[in-house]
Image: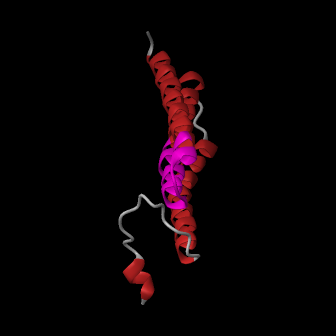
Amino acid sequence: MSINMIGEYFGVFLILIGSVMAVISAIGILRLPDVYTRSHAATKSSTLAVLLSLLGTFIYFWASENFISVRLLLGITFVFLTAPVSGHLITRAAYRSNVKLADSSTEDALEELFKK
């Protein structure tokens, strides 16, 4: 078994794990009760899913064709930097628009901060 074949299998494994994480993220978005917890599922797990899929694709092409894709590296960097920030901004906008927390939430940690 050559080192290239191991790299190909590792890339495929990362793509598979990324796909599983995307399904878990979709289930979380559907099942969680309010916009705040859904935003958490959308940003954390789907960011990880996209990053694993892109990294797996990068490793696969690197191992199989000795091709280093700058577009994939830029995609990884862009998703890594922008997805958490956009999730935070959407959640903050929802809070400032007085979207209510779910009934199962026990504490509003930002209440005192935004009353001022």
Question: What stretch of residues is rendered in magenta?
Answer: 27-48
**From this viewpoint, which residue is outermost toward the bottom?**
116
Q: Is residue 15 inside the magenta stretch?
A: no
Q: Is residue 31 inside the magenta stretch?
A: yes
How many numbered markers are drawn? 0
Q: Is residue 38 above or below residue 49?
A: below
Looking at the rendered image, the quarter that the N terminus falls into is: top left
**From this viewpoint, which residue is outermost toward the front?**
103
**Is residue 50 at least partly visible in the picture?**
no
User: As rendered, which of 111 and 5 lies closer to the eye?
Assistant: 111
**From this viewpoint, which residue is outermost toward the top?**
1
**From this viewpoint, which residue is outermost toward the right?**
71
User: As rendered, which of 8 and 31 lies closer to the eye?
Assistant: 31
Dominant secondary structure of the residues highlighted in magenta in the image: helix
**Residue, x 48% and y 45% (percent of image)?**
45
**Residue, x 59% and y 50% (percent of image)?**
74
Query: Quadrant of the rendered structure where residue 2 is?
Result: top left
Q: Is residue 81 above or below residue 30?
A: below
Q: Is residue 70 above or below residue 92?
A: above
Q: Is residue 103 above or below residue 92?
A: above
Looking at the rendered image, the quarter that the C terminus falls into is: bottom left
* Residue 15 x, y percent position in the rendering: 54, 30
* Residue 25 x, y percent position in the rendering: 53, 42
**Is residue 100 at least partly visible in the picture?**
yes
